[in-house]
Structure formats: structure tokens, C-alpha cells
Image (cartoon, grey):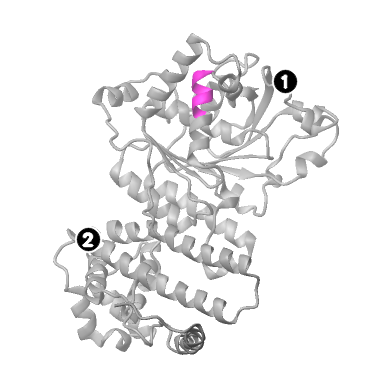
Amino acid sequence: MVHSQPLSTMSQGSASAGKENAANKLSPESVSMPQAPTLEKSLICMMAMDPTNIISHCISEGINEEYFYIPAHRILWEIFRRRYERNEPVDIASIAQILTDEGKLEAVGGNSGLADIFSVASSTALFESHYATIKEKYLRRCMIMAGNKMHDWAISSETEIDELLDEAEKEVMDIRRSSQTSVTWSLKKDIQTAMSNLEKMMDRKGDVLGLRTGYDALDSKINGLKGGELFVIAARPSMGKTSFLLNIVEHLVLEVKKPVLIFSCEMPSVQLVERLLYAKSGVSREDITSKKGLKGGQLKDLKEAITAYQNSGLIIDDTAAISISELRAKARRVLKEHPDTCAIGVDYLQLMRSHTKQAQNSREREIAEISAGLKGLAKELNVPIIVLAQLNRGPEQRTGKVKGRPMMSDLRESGAIEQDADMVGLLYRPDYYEKDEPEEAGQDDDEKKPAILVLAKNRNGPTGDIQLDFEARLMRFTQSASQKQGEE
């Protein structure tokens, strides 16, 4: 039965209830927070059993210490993560020694408590199930804490309501983003690598030792892309460095027929795919949006390009501001699942982050750590890494015949990039600087314009200019007719 209540009584009741709620709002101290201690302990044990797979999976999924409710498990997670980053073992003896040195052994229950944690799981078969439950409990705790914030804002804040609603929405969206499972690759679920393709790659004739890029003049100088090498392609904005990387990727995944992993820190993956389709099909964005529509031949070419990439081994991760630790963990996982991955591309270096304490105090130090991390990863995985980088305004400040021509000293924020790189290519388009207004350059998108890749550093071969042509409407670089294939 529903009972009515006078408005005056309701108002008084609401006021008193508000004060009571403010004093007794949900908090870790006032309620039993969602938690799964036994499963946390089991997950920690699984990390010790198979650190390469379990810890790397956790890092790539964005796990942090807040996922663990029990303080002892937070301590162990941080130690495990640090040692994994340094490629150090996470055996019980080493962990016990670290805990003793840091005065934290008793915080995990002493030697007996540590031994108990290390023995709770007998296999990693239940990892996905345990991880899912731990994540759910963490998200529920996040909801409670977000609710507490909103409660405080609504009771005491003098901020405008619209701004409060925006802040509340941001809190909820942050939780939503945390709940989303990270997907490193999405273009295809099953990549089939036929033996005939491998044999074709092995039997390919020519004097190039490594992977061909699709640019013979470049290949002849660098002897192809080889495992363990870091190839930096640097340019000013609007020079087409992303397009050049994608043109190389196109050759590797469609001609060499090997998977390639791309980390896109700047563009969403769908934009990269669109660029790849334009370049492959010869159909531009303007052709597609034209009132005349596509001609029969163009539609056929576009469909063939789509089919080619659907059947390719292209793997894209478009995590913004990805850290070197997260990139390393994801790359290791991809190489484990797709061991024939032939190259990694990164667009671009200055958008990456490093979360070490030293990096937080110096941007130059941060870039140096990222650069060294990429070089180390190339050697560890034995694949070439092609990383794009931004140049400073040095090219614009030059005059005369060298106006616009980049130099290695133009690399932004760190000289460590050129030190770590095996090859450094500086890309620019002379016509961009020949106009009085740079914005006017490239207006004739239907025409091919000259471009130059200045191979400024080549650790194992000659340097020099590589002549290219750039077709802006297709975002495509081709070999220049003025430079013979294979010219040294």
C-alpha cells in the first residue's frame, strides 16, 4: 500500500536525509568494497609461472596497481612489472630478496605468506576467467569512488550545473574506457600463411639481403630492411611521412605477403585503412565523393584493394599516447601469435610516452628512453622497426638552394634518435618550399610532384638522396623516373 506524505514533511526529511547521506556515503571504510582476494592471489601466482604471457597480457590490457584490492598484491604486482620490464626473473627467491631489501616482506605475510601466494595456482588455464572477475571488481570499486565524487560535487560545489554534469560524464566515460577490452588487431581474425608464400619469399632472387621496401633505389643502399634495425623516417608536417610508411607497409603485406604491425599514435585505424585503399586502388577520396560517381573500372579496382587487405596480415593498434612499456608488451604478444610478422611501424615517436621517474622531469630524457626502447625491441624481436619522427623548423629557416632541405640536427627534442637509429631518412618535397606561400604547394593534386628522401645515416651502407615522385590525391610515393632502379 502506498502512503502519502505532506510536502513540508518530505522536504524536511530530504534535508535530514541529505546530511545523513553526506556523513555515511559509500567509501572503502564504510562498506565492504567489491573484491576477489583469492583470485588476485591466483593471478599473481600465474604471473610468476608464465611471466612472458601473463604479465605482458596484463600490461597490454592496461592493468595497474588499483586492479588489486589487497595491498600485498599491489606490492607484488609493482615488483613483477618492474622485473618484467628489465627482462629479469620473477622467481620466489628473487622476489623475497627484493621485499627484504625494501622492508616490505612482512607486508605480504613474510616468507610463509609469499610461499602461499606462489603456490595457490597449479596452471594458467583459468587466467582469462580470473582476470575478468578481478577487472569487474575493480570497475565496481571505480563506480563507487566516482559516485562519491559526484556526491561531494552535488552537495558542496559552487560550480555551474552544466560543468558538473560534464565532469560527472567524464568520470563515467573514464570507467567505460577502462572496461573496454584492448584489441591490438582487428582487420582479420585468422591470418593464413601459405607455405608457397614463404617459399616464394625465400627463393626470391636479387642481391638485397633484407626485406624489399618497394623502392629499389632505397633497397640498394640499405640492403633491404633487416631484423634488429631501427629505421627513422623524419619530416616536417605535411611532407607525407605517414603516406611513405604506408606505401612500404603495402608492399610488405601485399607483395611480400607477411604480417606487419602498425602503432598509430596520431590517426585512428580507419583513416589509415582509407589511405591504404586510396593508394592501392588508384581511387581518390575526391573520386568517391564526386557527383559523377565511380566508373566501372574504378569500382572494380576499389573492390580488389578491399579484398587484398581483408586477406592480408595487416595489424593495427591506434592507442593514443601509447607508452614504450605498453607498446613493447603488445608487440611481444603479436610476435608470439604471429611469429612471421616481418616489420613494425610506429607513427610517430614524439607522440609516445615513457612513465619512468626520470622521464617525467625531462622531455629530452623521455624521448631518449623511447628511442632506446624501440631499438632494444627491434633487437629483441629480430624485426625491423620503422618509426616516424617530427623535425623542428630548421628546414623553413634555410635559404637559397638548401631551403627546405632537412638535416639530422633538425630532429626534435633529442639527439638520441640519430644515435639509436641504424638508418635515418629525411623526407621532403622541394615544391612545397618553392612557392611564396607553403599552403599553395601541392594544390595540383592530380600531378606528381618531386620528393626526396635524404638518407642521412646508414650504418651499414652508403648515404645519399633517393629521388621519388609524390601523388597527393592518392597519398602515394613512387620511384622517380629520373633515378634508375637500384642506383647507388
Residue at position x 79%, y 39% in the image: 396
Tag 1: residue type?
Asp
Q: Quadrant of the C terminus?
A: top right
Residue at position x 25%, y 68% in the image: 43
Q: Taking 341 as reference, is 293 left or right? A: right
For disc 2, the marked residue is: 129
Q: Compared to 164, does 212 lie above or below?
A: above
Q: Residues within 10 Å of mark 2 (few under 14, many from 20)?
A: few
Where does the image place residue 300, in percent across and percent down from the top left?
A: 44, 14
Res 187 quadrant in image: top left
Where does the image place residue 334, in percent across and percent down from the top left?
A: 34, 45
For disc 1, the marked residue is: 444
Q: Residues within 10 Å of mark 1 (few under 14, many from 20)?
A: few
Q: Main secondary structure of the magenta part?
A: helix
Q: Which numbered disc, 2 or 1, marks the residue that appears first in the sequence?
A: 2
Q: In what element is the residue under mark 2?
A: helix
Q: CA distance from mark 2 to mark 1?
A: 57 Å
Tag 2: residue type?
Ser
259 magenta-colored: no
Question: Magenta residues, as a range?
Answer: 276-282
Q: Compared to 233, does 179 lie above or below?
A: below
Q: Is residue 419 visible?
A: no
- Residue at the farthest top position: 296
